[in-house]
Amino acid sequence: MTPTTNIREWPFRLRPPQILAIGFALVIALGTTLLALPVASETGQPVSIVDALFTATSATCVTGLNTVDTPTTFSLFGEIVIVLLIQTGGLGFLTLSTMVALLLGKRITLKERLLMQEALNQLTVEGVVRLTKYVLTFTFICEGLGALLLGLRFSRDIPLGQAFYFGIFHAVSAFCNAGFSLFSANLMDYRGDLLVNLVITTLIILGGLGFSVVADIYTKRSWQRLSLHSKVVLTTTFWLIVLGTILFMALEYTNPLSLAPLPLNEKLLASYFQAVTPRTAGFNTLNIGALRPVTLFLLIILMFIGASPGSTGGGIKTSTFTTIAVAVWSIIQGKYDIEIFGRRLPRGMVLKALAVAAVSMMLVVTVTGVLLITEQKEMEIVLFETVSAFGTVGLSAGLTPQLTVAGKLLITATMYSGRVGPLTLAFAIAQRLGRQGIKHYPEEGVIIG
Amino acid sequence: MTPTTNIREWPFRLRPPQILAIGFALVIALGTTLLALPVASETGQPVSIVDALFTATSATCVTGLNTVDTPTTFSLFGEIVIVLLIQTGGLGFLTLSTMVALLLGKRITLKERLLMQEALNQLTVEGVVRLTKYVLTFTFICEGLGALLLGLRFSRDIPLGQAFYFGIFHAVSAFCNAGFSLFSANLMDYRGDLLVNLVITTLIILGGLGFSVVADIYTKRSWQRLSLHSKVVLTTTFWLIVLGTILFMALEYTNPLSLAPLPLNEKLLASYFQAVTPRTAGFNTLNIGALRPVTLFLLIILMFIGASPGSTGGGIKTSTFTTIAVAVWSIIQGKYDIEIFGRRLPRGMVLKALAVAAVSMMLVVTVTGVLLITEQKEMEIVLFETVSAFGTVGLSAGLTPQLTVAGKLLITATMYSGRVGPLTLAFAIAQRLGRQGIKHYPEEGVIIG
Ligand SMILES: [K+]
Ligand SMILES: [K+]
């Protein structure tokens, strides 16, 4: 059996993850060239090729880590290149990963209903075109509304034209979970602004749920009828935000450099924002470098889990995390059926979740190890920055602006792997399902634990 | 089906992990009382109850972390209490965990040959007595030979009687993977001594392989005929030591505070020693606090993996690590059969390994988080000390002697959980195997990665 026979409906020679990997590399190459031009620079003095590569990768992979300050380094031309890279990366990923999710969903649930089959038929060429249209419509509605609200708000501080330009840039950056900002202080000056906080976090969450979940909600309009995937994603997202907010507030409540000086409502708002942003938007309304070590540790965990599959966000994904958690809990209870929401999770899915989590952890551990050598900094901030790059989060505890050239290249590679990797891995696994070894060895156990 | 019907051969009312948990708690309580007596103190001024509890737990759980300096704090009486606690904890665990391994092995391989069935028959009362006799014989042969060689070597530096007392103490401490030392500088003064290095590391490795592996080698005397478990444990142990040595040497070669000043042969010897000791002996011949961050990171990984099941060592265990690694590699390749050494690993075993690793990680993450709050130290050394306590390793990057009372109690609880926990967990899972839910829910997938 050749790989191509596994997914018959896909009409092209390259598999979606290959298209994604090559496409992203080409977009990054083009972006690097444009950002390295003198016209892209605020001062006319072109930025170094390494910084251009870093910025182009960070934008295309919707990460948001910055070795240079966006507004003071790049001209209007440079900024427009950045927002176009974000939109291309975000949309391209959203479209392609939704297709992959559909293809995978089809292969895995086999005789069961196809995820979203009501919304989308077979993945023929017309299906692909229709899907892309749905995704584009959804994206532009969210970004358009967000840009409008943000533009109106910003117009109270800056001229109208600039305000709407800023509104569009931040709406795109938020929906695509990119975290790039035209404010040097990121969103710290809007820490207490309810409108900006709610618009930005809502865009982040909508972009991070994954298109299939949004389509599922749109077509079903009833919790009971939602697919298991949607239920898992929505429940996990809800609890990560609620628990993240409570924990963040508890841990930083008395920190004079973060929450302590704020009134109670701003404490709550800032905690909510900082609980949403590590999954995996990367905006910040507080100085991340001033947070307590234990809070950085909490953010590292949230960043590693990340957003949901087929979304603009990164990380190992909410569904992966919950699948592992539920499986572990079942195994401890001695249940062989791994059950959630009245459904049994296929055993192969648990193994796949294990593979995604283990490979991600290996990547993070390896990159952290190498960065500890090249950067000679404390493990705390090195691990933070590595997970932030891997999860395409973009929060920084202060290391990125000080990175050595080797460090910049390594983080660049990590951002790229973090964006393209998990999807490619998941696809590769699903694609090879069913290719069983011909020869079965006899079974034998080892002692665990 | 009641739990007791699952393992019929065990003739007592309490399960082995319960005996272990209660037994360890009683031994620790007794040890705490004895170590808090004025007669146990070198100065006659009794140590605080918290330090007595910490030391008793550290000795009984063969961890080796110290809030006080053993030789200058404790009298000869105190030291003898400590070595007896080590021997009791080490032997008790070795015996009980070997029984559990046999019971589990029996349940898991089901129709296949019982691990070590040539060496041991059914686990009847006579079987238990015979097993205990084998374990005791093996232990005393190893410790006796070690004590003799170490005593002869130490007699060149200190009076003969004291030399053999030191020999016995360190041989017991090494075989039981305890890491307690009567030298305030631990084994740093013997950094270049080939005999001390080889005797100590050999005792550590023999104690850490697990009795079932030793018995398997003794009865089979042929690689081909060894059980899969023995092959996995021996191969993993070999590669962790070889790669650990090479990586340690590469990372510390130019560190003026560790390897740089040493001649090449001592560099190699010290690297070998420091690669063996984190799994999970806890002796050191170099100052751990002076190692580079990246090296501490390497040691954290080795400490987390730890020794092998049914041994005196801790951690998630070599077999757990390798099972996960092989499973992940198979899943990535799209193989549904998880194969190693011409054998297929049961799917349930992979899920069990996942559960052990995930629960361990959760424990380490939680304890690290709480310690970050109570101790206000960098994540690096907090994580190091937590993993060291969890894996019953006993290496310290400098935090333990400075711990707050809350931190001491938390590390005490972690040492206890790290010793008793994984075995209890593994046993509980195995015991409940087969208790299937009566109602099967319909299967449905989610999207991973
Ligand atoms: K981001
Ligand atoms: K130890």
Image (cartoon, coloured by chain):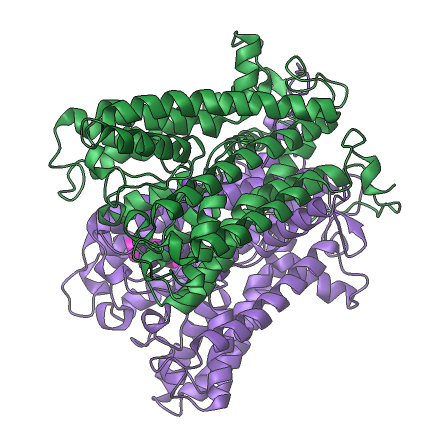
Chain colours: A purple, B green
The span picked out in magenta is A54-59
Residue nearest the observer in this picture, A407 or B280: B280
What x and y, as percent, mark residue A73?
A: 22, 68
Q: Is residue A148 above or below residue A206?
A: below
Residue A48 lies in the magenta stretch: no
Q: Is residue A44 above or below residue A197?
A: above
Q: Is residue A357 above or below residue B201?
A: below
Left or right for A329, reference B8: left
Residue nearest the observer in this picture, A146 or B237: B237
What x and y, as percent, mark residue B3?
A: 81, 41
Residue nearest the observer in this picture, B179 or B303: B179
- Quadrant of the picture in which ligand 2 is shown: top left
Q: Is residue B238 above or below residue A109?
A: above
Q: Residue at x 16, y 42 (%)?
A: B255
Residue A56 lies in the magenta stretch: yes
What x and y, as percent, mark residue B274?
A: 30, 35
Q: Residue at x 40, y 62 (%)?
A: A84
Magenta highlight: main SS = helix
Q: Quadrant of residue B83?
A: top left
Q: Quadrant of residue B376?
A: bottom left
- Residue A179 can be seen, yes or no: no
What x and y, as percent, mark residue A215?
A: 69, 61
Left or right for A201, reference A82: right
